[in-house]
Amino acid sequence: ISKALPPAWIRGLCDVPAVSSISVGAAFTLIKSFSKDEVQTFLTLTGDANPIHTGTAAALAAGLDGPVLPGMLLASMFPAIIGTRFPGAVYATQTLAFKAPALVGQAVQARVVVVRCSGRRVTFDTQCTLVGQTQPLVQGTALALLVSGQPQEGQEGQKTI
């Protein structure tokens, strides 16, 4: 069994205190720039061989401005936020719509907002944007089952790594 440490950006999330109670409207964000090496690691792990993520020529031929971040890499920021803020949460469902590309190295912000609480079930609106912009890159809805009972009054939080 490997005892390798998780990537630094995941270890950084662990420094954020867990939220024990939340309410509708509570928002949590994560800001991250993914390097070429991080993208390559993700592609290797997933088996994604699409050259638009690593090759300038392929990206330009596809009508893009350069190599783009995999949409699923962006979407992986949502469970990173939820699982870190609510340790033990079970990430049950996620819908996704891929709206616009982000280039490798651009700073992106993932944001989850509580839209419904029902017992242990919490529904979040999820969205990634470029930092400082409002156009969605990826958006959807997530459902998580929290470990504790009915969420109560909560707080907002942001983590930049």
Image (cartoon, helix red, strand yellow):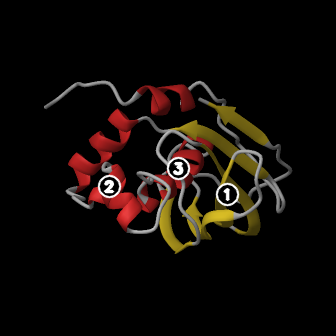
Q: Quadrant of the N terminus?
A: top left
Q: Residue at x 52, y 46 (%)?
A: 80
Q: Is residue 106 above or below residue 122?
A: above
Q: Residue at x 47, y 62 (%)?
A: 64
> Mark 3 — residue?
77
Q: Depth check: give the residue in front, 33 or 93.
A: 33
Residue 91 shown left or right of residue 58 in the figure: right
Q: Mark 1 vs mark 3: give the one in front.
A: 3
Q: Residue at x 32, y 24 (%)?
A: 5
Secondary structure, mark 2, is helix
The Cα atoms of the two marked residues, 1 and 3, are separated by 25 Å
Q: Is residue 29 above or below residue 92?
A: above
Q: Mark 2 vs mark 3: give the one in front.
A: 2
Residue 63 shown left or right of residue 135 in the figure: left
Type of residue at label 2? Ala
Q: Mark 2 vs mark 1: give the one in front.
A: 2
The Cα atoms of the two marked residues, 2 and 1, are separated by 52 Å
Residue most extreme to the left: 1
> Where residue 78 sits: x, y (%)?
56, 54
> Where residue 44 sits: x, y (%)?
21, 47
The Cα atoms of the two marked residues, 2 and 3, are separated by 28 Å
Residue 15 shown left or right of residue 155 in the figure: left
> Mark 1 — residue?
149
> Mark 2 — residue?
57
Type of residue at label 1? Gly
Image quarter of residue 116: bottom right
Type of residue at label 3? Met
